Image: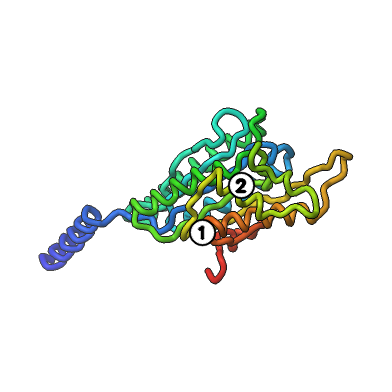
Amino acid sequence: MAVVIALAFAVLGYFAYSSFTAKSAKASTICSLVIDTTNSVENSAAVQNYKTLAGEVVKGCQSANAMLDVWTVNQSGPNTGHLGTYPLYSTAVNGPAIERELNGTYRSVMRAINGVFSDGPTGGTGGSNITAAIQLAALNLQREARTLGVKTKKLIVLTDGMQLTDNVSVRALSSLGDNPVLLVAAAKSEFATNLQGVQVFFYGVNTGQMASNGQELPPWFDLKVQNFWQKLVSADGGTNCAYQQTSSSEAILVCGGDS
């Protein structure tokens, strides 16, 4: 009996020691989610798509043991808003505690994101300055990666792609002969962005823009807008991973040869 009791105390002592000396989990990925809240979310279908995509991105980043920053593209006031920084990994030491912590963080992130959508488009006359939001998000992404010693960096942008400011506007691509390369040069000149080592994903993209006669602009316009963003990402040193309207949850953060 004495041997059994001694063994029991030894086992309890081991688990107590392990609990108090266990190292906290660390981020292995940095995720940055940029949400366009300008005219990109004028209709309910777009809002629902963005909500679904945002939820899948958060889940994907959580599966990747990521630190997540959430940003918004605004049309009035500051061009870019920062909703917050969320550690999507657990420092708990047992299964139930880990699950509670991760579920709580997920709910906190989604409450913040849903709050943005509940207000509708931000309005204002400042245009949709998507490049400025990407620039700020990327700056913070690179800084966090250096600080935490993380190599995997993912930037996810939910937008219709309609960059509309005085100096950098995709309306400059509304003629068949317009060259996206010239707009890329203008964007790089005004918004120097470091995307070295960053995987970049665009979701929600579908401009659906109307010409002055009320007709939707032709498919080649969307292709030019896509060409602009992908050339800009490449010019800034990033990797183009996705440019599409929707995604399956399994593939939302998969880039190239990733599995």
Label 2 vs 1, first from the N-terminus:
2
87 w.r.t. 165: above or below = below
In the depicted structure, whether residue 259 falls above or below residue 54 = below
Report the residue marked by disc 1.
237
Q: Residues within 10 Å of mark 1 (few under 14, many from 20)?
A: some
Residue 190 lies in quadrant: top right
Say if residue 63 shows up in the picture: no
Q: Is residue 227 above or below residue 81?
A: below
Assess disc 2: are there few (<14), some (14-19) or many (≥20) residues with their C-alpha within 10 Å of its C-alpha: some
Q: Which quadrant, please, contains the N terminus?
A: bottom left
The foreground one among 92 and 114 is: 114
Q: Name the amino acid, label 1.
A: Gly
Task: List x then y, in percent, for residue 76.
Answer: 61, 29
Amino acid bearing label 2? Ala
Residue at (39% x, 53% y) in the render:
145
Nearer mark to the viewer, of 2 and 1: 2
Residue 51 image offset from top left, x and y in percent:
63, 45
Q: Residue at x 69, y 54 (%)?
A: 180
Verify CB contact (< 8 Å) between mark 2 and mark 1. Answer: no
Residue corresponding to mark 2: 186
The quadrant holding residue 19 is bottom left
Label 2 sits on a secondary structure element that is helix
Nearest the viewer among 104 and 85 is 85
In the picture, the disc for residue 162 is: none
Per the image, label 1 sits on a secondary structure element best described as loop
Q: Residue at x 67, y 47 (%)?
A: 161
Q: Does any portion of residue 190 appear in the rendered image?
A: yes
Q: In 3D space, how far apart are the residues under numbered discs 2 and 1 (Cα atoms)?
A: 16 Å
Q: Residue 116: x, y in percent?
A: 59, 35
